[in-house]
Amino acid sequence: MVPMKAAPFEYARPETLSEACSLLAEHGPDAKLIAGGQSLVPMMAMRLARPAWLIDIARLAELQHLTAPAEGHADEVFVVGAGVRQCVMERDARACANLPLLAKALRWVGHVQTRNRGTIGGSIAHGDTSAEIALTACVLDAMLELRDTAGVTEISAREFFLAPMVTAILPEQCLAEIRFPVWRSADKNIQRGCAFEEVSVRHGDFALVSACAQLELDADGRCLRAELGLGGAAPTPLALPEVGAQLVGAKLDEQAISAAAAAAVELADPEGDLHASADYRRHLARVLVERVLRAAQQDARSKVGT
């Protein structure tokens, strides 16, 4: 019988981020941070995770900030504290305006109850290849700030994920904030669009495969900039800057979209399991890349004149 009760552990609720880092330094790999607990608590209940110490950072004000870039500045960043709840992020007007791709990705994260407790940083730190927030961070090339008693370390989201459920974070480090690049331009003729899609057994389940894209088009519909990626199609969330680069300068007709989807599948490396074979995941990857490119293009076109 699978245990449904966590193994015994000690509990601490630090008052500051510095205190949390000191506890991590003291207890090392025997300690786990908890904020939303949407991934860790089920793993503890099944005894897949057995931390000796649980360090609760859910109430740390230092991890709750949302900072939008000032108006009129191009290529700025939207700063998100790692402890910000997913439901707060999806309802924040500044976040939706500056990070539309993340706003669309959040609709696919679990259920309302999941997002009410889950945090932005917790989803990233968990390192699931199918996680929507992690994929968006990779595609947008977000920067992650890690804290420990020695100071601050910065790492790109594209370098953070190493293997399934394995990240570059050290036992003594805490993910403090995420800095998402914001796409802006003074040229009013440039239109932007984005899309996020996934296929799962049931809505709210882990994605078999997910895909997302964000585009920038000129007045003639020619692609000026493109980023896209796949989740569940490789051991880690997969950003595809090479595929985005091949779209630059092209009009997104069916031939260009089909070629981009084929290139994306070539870079994918899915594994089969009891839910879907590797070949089926490759098929889904191709279909979803085509779908998000069309949807992102339509999203951009719908904003002409706005």
Image: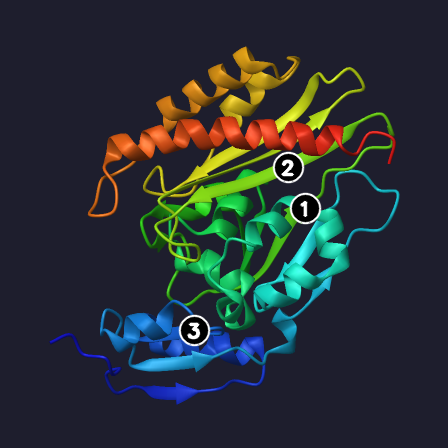
Residue 233 vs residue 68: left or right? left
Q: Which residue is at the front of the view, 254 or 241?
A: 254
- Density class for disc 3 (Cα within 10 Å; few <14, some 14-19, many ≥20) is some
Q: Which residue is at the front of the view, 182 or 263?
A: 263
| Residue 111 percent location from the top left of the image | 49, 64
User: Residue shown at 53%/19% (left/top)?
Assistant: 257
Residue 106 vs residue 88: left or right? left
- Which element type, helix, strand or loop, lies under badge 1? helix
Amino acid type shown at disc 1: Pro
- Rendered image: mark on residue 100: 1
Circles 1 and 2 in contact, beta carbons < 8 Å: yes
Residue to which mark 2 is pinned: 194
Report whether residue 120 is seen. yes
User: Residue shown at 23%/80% (left/top)?
Assistant: 4
| Residue 192 percent location from the top left of the image | 73, 33
Q: Which residue is at the front of the view, 2 or 138?
A: 2
Residue to which mark 3 is pinned: 37
Amino acid type shown at disc 2: Cys
- Which element type, helix, strand or loop, lies under badge 2? strand
User: Residue shown at 65%/77% (left/top)?
Assistant: 61
> Where is the N terminus found, in terms of image quarters?
bottom left
- Density class for disc 2 (Cα within 10 Å; few <14, some 14-19, many ≥20) is many
Compared to residue 216, the image places residue 167 above or below, namely below
